[in-house]
């Protein structure tokens, strides 16, 4: 559900000179090479195959399984960091995307994307993300190598079906739960691909989107000439290779800058942003050493020891509270700017993405730094070398905690500044700017404080 702009002021990005990284001849040669990004896709696919094999046929105990360590201790914590530094580049080399490309090349029907997917794809992504998180905690997917393997094979099946029937990367754009997450996070990323308007105005081929005889067009259904966000661009460089006018540029930018001037805010994207905040809360709460004590109190309150029931209650509460808080802030903002609560929810929900990202990275930082050596140990286990008595930590818990606090502080300031820029770009009157901005400052402070409190409590190890 996109919201049309209403009078006051259209969010316009100031046209300032941007450095073009493609002026570096070596980098440009790499990105325009026919070997890129295939030269990275193949090793990634081979590692993915090994991980799936280990999950399905390797040790049944998570702490002995390289697939579990590689997926949840290494890849899952690193991926949001990659989104900040490189945008959705992971999506260009993702094994699911590679499989989809190959299936489409050899047996694909290349049918148009169904209208309901184009319209409701983001809601499918939102729902899938919520269900995967819920099922993980309810059925212990992460702690169960077979469960993780089944999940990856199930996704692979969907990818193959999508590649066989539909054109381009329909799965990545409209169905992948990680694609929705990466789309939101990539708006905060430090890289921006954009076209040169003066050159595009004279172009009649549209090769960047359609492709040409030698190079495929954009797999993500993005037209670089009109693209105003990095949410769907996976930096595959097809457009760079196909453009006959050398119009495409790749520029560094201030992290969060991509959130400041969103022309068509969407309620469903802001909803995903606030839901991720709830998911981070769930992940933190259930990893705490006091979770068992909390669980017992909840069991006594509801009168059942059924974990399915007690966790589902916890999950619903953790999801609902941030959403209600964003609605409350949007209503408070409405009193100042006279826009609807829904419109404020859609517009200012993007401001929470930096804090989302910080909370996500901070939570996974514990697994990466406290359990990171398990990746090395389980890999050595593939060759019969056992390291059970060794510590899996790279640094102490206190060091991890300090890093988590720093990340939350950076995310909080990023969200506050983003809320200010959104308000300033949409309203002219000083009273409207401040009145619209303040409720989201309060919300950012509250959510940051909740994250810090949870990170102050000792967490349980996964591996």
Image (spheres, helix red, strand yellow):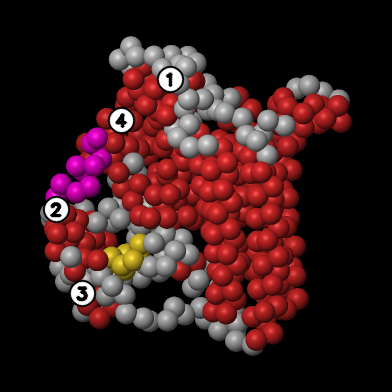
- The residue beneath circle 4 is 47
**Circle 1: is it few (<14), some (14-19), or many (20+) Cα within 10 Å?**
many
Query: How far separated are the C-alphas under marks 2 and 1?
Result: 37 Å
Mark 2 or 3: the one toward you: 2
**Spot occupied by residue 346 in the image (x, y as percentages of width and height):** 60, 64
Query: How far separated are the C-alphas under marks 4 and 3?
Result: 41 Å
Mark 2 or 1: the one toward you: 1
Query: How far separated are the C-alphas under marks 4 and 2?
Result: 23 Å
Label 2 secondary element: loop
**Spot occupied by residue 112 in the image (x, y as percentages of width and height):** 36, 50
Mark 4 or 2: the one toward you: 4
Q: What stretch is highlighted in magenta?
A: 32-43
The answer to whether marks 2 and 1 mark residues whose Cβ atoms lie closer than 8 Å is no
**Circle 3: is it few (<14), some (14-19), or many (20+) Cα within 10 Å?**
some
Label 1 secondary element: loop
Q: Which of marks 2 and 3 is nearer the N terminus?
A: 2
Residue 203's disc is: 3
Query: From where the camera sits, is residue 241 visible?
Result: no
Label 3 secondary element: loop
- The residue beneath circle 2 is 33
């Amino acid at each position: 559900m996109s919201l049309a702009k209403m009078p006051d002021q259209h969010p316009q990005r100031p046209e300032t000179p941007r450095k073009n990284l493609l002026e570096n001849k070596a980098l440009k040669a790499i990105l325009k090479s026919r070997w890129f990004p295939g030269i990275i896709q193949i090793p990634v696919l081979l590692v993915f195959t090994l991980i799936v094999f280990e999950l399905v046929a390797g040790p049944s105990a998570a702490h002995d399984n390289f697939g579990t360590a590689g997926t949840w201790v290494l890849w899952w914590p690193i991926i949001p960091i990659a989104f900040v530094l490189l945008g959705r580049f992971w999506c260009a080399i993702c094994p699911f995307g590679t499989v989809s490309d190959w299936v489409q090349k050899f047996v694909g029907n290349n049918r148009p994307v169904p209208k309901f997917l184009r319209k409701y794809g983001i809601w499918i992504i939102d729902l899938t993300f919520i269900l995967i998180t819920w099922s993980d905690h309810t059925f212990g997917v992460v702690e169960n190598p077979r469960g993780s393997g089944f999940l990856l094979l199930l996704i692979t099946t969907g990818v193959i079906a999508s590649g066989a029937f539909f054109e381009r990367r329909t799965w990545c754009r409209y169905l992948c739960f990680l694609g929705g997450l990466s789309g939101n996070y990539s708006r905060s990323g430090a890289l921006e691909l954009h076209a040169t308007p003066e050159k595009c105005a004279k172009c009649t081929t549209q090769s960047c989107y359609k492709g040409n005889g030698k190079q495929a067009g954009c797999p993500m259904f993005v037209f670089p000439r009109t693209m105003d966000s990095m949410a769907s661009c996976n930096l595959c460089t097809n457009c760079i290779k196909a453009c006959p006018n050398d119009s495409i540029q790749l520029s560094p930018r201030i992290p969060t800058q991509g959130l400041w001037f969103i022309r068509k805010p969407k309620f469903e994207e802001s909803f995903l942003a606030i839901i991720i905040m709830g998911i981070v809360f769930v992940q933190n709460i259930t990893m705490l050493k006091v979770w068992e004590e909390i669980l017992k109190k909840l069991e006594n309150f509801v009168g059942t020891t059924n974990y399915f029931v007690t966790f589902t209650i916890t999950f619903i509460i953790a999801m609902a509270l941030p959403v209600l808080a964003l609605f409350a802030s949007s209503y408070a903002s409405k009193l100042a700017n006279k826009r609807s609560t829904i419109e404020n929810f859609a517009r200012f929900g993007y401001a929470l993405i930096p804090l989302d990202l910080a909370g996500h990275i901070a939570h996974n930082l514990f697994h990466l730094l406290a359990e990171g050596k398990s990746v090395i140990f389980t890999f050595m286990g593939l060759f019969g070398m056992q390291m059970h008595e060794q510590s899996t930590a790279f640094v102490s818990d206190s060091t991890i905690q300090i890093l988590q606090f720093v990340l939350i502080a950076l995310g909080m300031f990023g969200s506050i500044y983003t809320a200010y820029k959104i308000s300033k770009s949409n309203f002219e009157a000083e009273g409207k700017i401040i009145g619209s901005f303040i409720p989201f400052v309060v919300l950012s402070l509250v959510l940051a404080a909740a994250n810090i409190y949870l990170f102050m409590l000792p967490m349980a190890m996964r591996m």
